[in-house]
Image: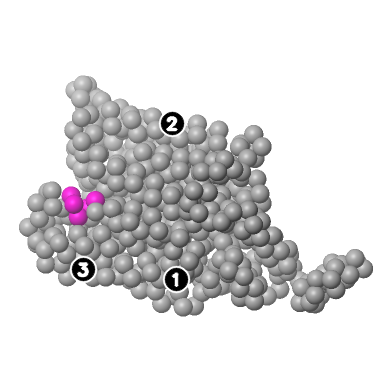
């Protein structure tokens, strides 16, 4: 329908006529949860499940792999940590790839790395096979950690975006918990084949879900854009206002600047970059990778059963992650992040105190109990907020003209910080177990202050509304 004709109709008091000349009087403006939205999210987060499974795999498979292939401690350490190197390699081009070939094809590309990686591990004859397979999985999940939250944020309506986007962390937790549950029951080769299942499911499922409507709009594929958005929102929902907002935002971003990495250093993007990079650095330096990769050794040092500790942690992570998903669009991002960072800080203080008692030989019989309670508290409070919400916020705050470059930068920062922590943790523990956990607790305390002062609340706002205000600092945003 010509714009001029539509304007005349609007002036004559017919606001319910859309661009196709169809009366919208009986069409709802409220976006509901549709089957295709649920299916699209589920297929996307299968990649997140693979990521969680891969993180926990190296811990549970250690004894079996070292026994069967005769690996030394240093050789297995390379296998355990090389995934973070792959993650950095995948993170660097992740944003550009997602912008160039689309969100769906990027997820498909990630499985080209993950599936051969799991197969190489399953049929490994020596350390080289293991390392190449683990590195390949790292590249795949490096792509996944960027594109999955971005895709989900771009397909969901504002009133459900937080819960759906945080579903990725729920699947990471489920993958992590599953590998701990069955890792002591089946062989490491069979365990790696189980890691293939979510990859294959995502690979097949991608043929049945739509591309991101915002990516289609950015490429001026108007017909596909409107059809996809209508499909995602429901056939009885009026999408005209949302579609116009998306078009307007894309037009403004494309006229303002070209998508180049150096644009990130413009003053108008300083605030979202500080928030995105800051949350990722604080998340990793707060000890999360150390807890994931070295939880067994921490329990051994505290003279506590590793089987009881890791299994209980895996069990509790699932309801904690579910609670985080359910609460995200009710309480908001900032509140959950604050609760999470304060909770992790107090939990790590307790772990640090337990090792202090051990070093002082004073009430050292309390060390195992305090360590167990502290690590469980850390796992639960971390899963509620700091685990997944930084990725949710990353997917929301960057305007389209810099989303690719900014997303790649933030993802690279996260993987780089993860590598630093996994590499240095053993040295930190040799220096001082007490000092290590008090250091992590201090970082979590700084995180709470950072969130309180700088992180904006994005609950209940469209991506376009967020992008219109995110160039201003907190006094103007909140």
Give the vertical position of 324 relative to 338 (above or below): below
Comparing marks 2 and 3, which lies closer to the viewer?
3
From the viewer's perspective, tell me whether residue 419 is left or right of residue 231.
left
Indicate the quadrant containing the N terminus: top left, top right, bottom left or bottom right: bottom right
Q: Earlier in the sequence, mark 1 or mark 3?
A: 1
Q: Earlier in the sequence, mark 1 or mark 2?
A: 1
Q: Residues within 10 Å of mark 3 (few under 14, many from 20)?
A: many
Q: Give the CA distance from mark 1 to mark 2.
A: 40 Å
Give the vertical position of 266 relative to 184 (above or below): above
Which residue matches tag 2?
445
Q: Which residues are magenta?
A: 77-81
Which residue matches tag 3?
120
* Quarter holding residue 255: bottom right
Comparing marks 1 and 2, which lies closer to the viewer?
1
Q: Give the CA distance from mark 1 to mark 3.
A: 23 Å
Would you say residue 440 sits in the magenta stretch?
no
From the image, give the main secondary structure of the stretch colored magenta: helix
* Nearer to the camera, 364 or 270: 270
Report the residue at 67% width, 63% height from top: 247
């Amino acid at each position: 329908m010509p714009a001029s004709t539509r304007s005349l109709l609007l002036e004559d008091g017919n606001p319910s006529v859309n661009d196709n000349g169809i009366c919208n009087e009986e069409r709802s403006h409220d976006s509901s949860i549709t089957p295709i939205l649920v299916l699209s999210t589920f297929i996307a987060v299968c990649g997140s499940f693979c990521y969680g499974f891969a993180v926990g795999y190296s811990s549970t498979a250690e004894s079996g792999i070292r026994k069967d292939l005769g690996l030394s401690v240093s050789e297995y350490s390379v296998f355990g940590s090389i995934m973070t190197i792959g993650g950095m390699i995948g993170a660097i081009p992740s944003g550009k790839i997602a912008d160039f070939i689309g969100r769906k094809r990027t997820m498909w590309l990630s499985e080209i790395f993950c599936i051969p990686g799991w197969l190489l591990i399953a049929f490994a004859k020596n350390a080289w096979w293991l390392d190449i397979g683990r590195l390949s999985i790292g590249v795949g999940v490096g792509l996944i950690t960027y594109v999955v939250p971005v895709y989900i944020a771009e397909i969901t309506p504002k009133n459900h975006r937080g819960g759906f986007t945080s579903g990725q962390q729920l699947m990471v937790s489920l993958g992590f918990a599953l590998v701990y549950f069955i890792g002591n029951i089946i062989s490491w080769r069979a365990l790696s084949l189980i890691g293939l299942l979510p990859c294959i499911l995502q690979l097949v499922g991608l043929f049945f879900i739509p591309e991101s409507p915002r990516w289609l709009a950015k490429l001026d594929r108007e017909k596909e854009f409107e059809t996809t958005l209508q499909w995602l929102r429901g056939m009885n929902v009026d999408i005209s206002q949302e579609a116009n907002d998306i078009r307007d935002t894309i037009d403004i971003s494309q006229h303002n600047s070209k998508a180049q990495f150096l644009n990130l250093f413009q003053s108008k993007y300083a605030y979202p970059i500080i928030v995105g990079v800051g949350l990722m650095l604080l998340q990793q330096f707060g000890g999360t990778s150390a807890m994931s990769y070295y939880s067994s050794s921490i329990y051994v040092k505290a003279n506590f059963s590793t089987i009881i500790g890791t299994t209980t942690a895996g069990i509790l992570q699932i309801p904690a992650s579910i609670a985080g998903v359910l609460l995200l669009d009710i309480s908001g991002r900032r509140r959950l992040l604050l609760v999470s960072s304060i909770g992790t800080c107090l939990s790590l203080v307790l772990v640090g105190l337990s090792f202090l008692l051990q070093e002082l030989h004073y009430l050292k019989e309390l060390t195992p109990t305090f360590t167990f309670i502290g690590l469980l508290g850390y796992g639960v409070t971390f899963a509620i907020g700091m685990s997944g919400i930084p990725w949710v916020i990353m997917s929301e705050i960057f305007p389209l003209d810099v989303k690719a470059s900014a997303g790649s930068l933030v993802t690279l920062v996260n993987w780089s910080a993860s590598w630093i922590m996994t590499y240095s943790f053993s040295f930190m523990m040799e220096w001082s177990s007490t000092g290590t956990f008090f250091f992590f607790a201090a970082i979590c305390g700084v995180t709470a202050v950072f969130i309180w002062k700088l992180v904006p609340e994005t609950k209940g706002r469209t991506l376009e509304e967020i992008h219109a205000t995110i160039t201003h600092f907190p006094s103007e945003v909140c």
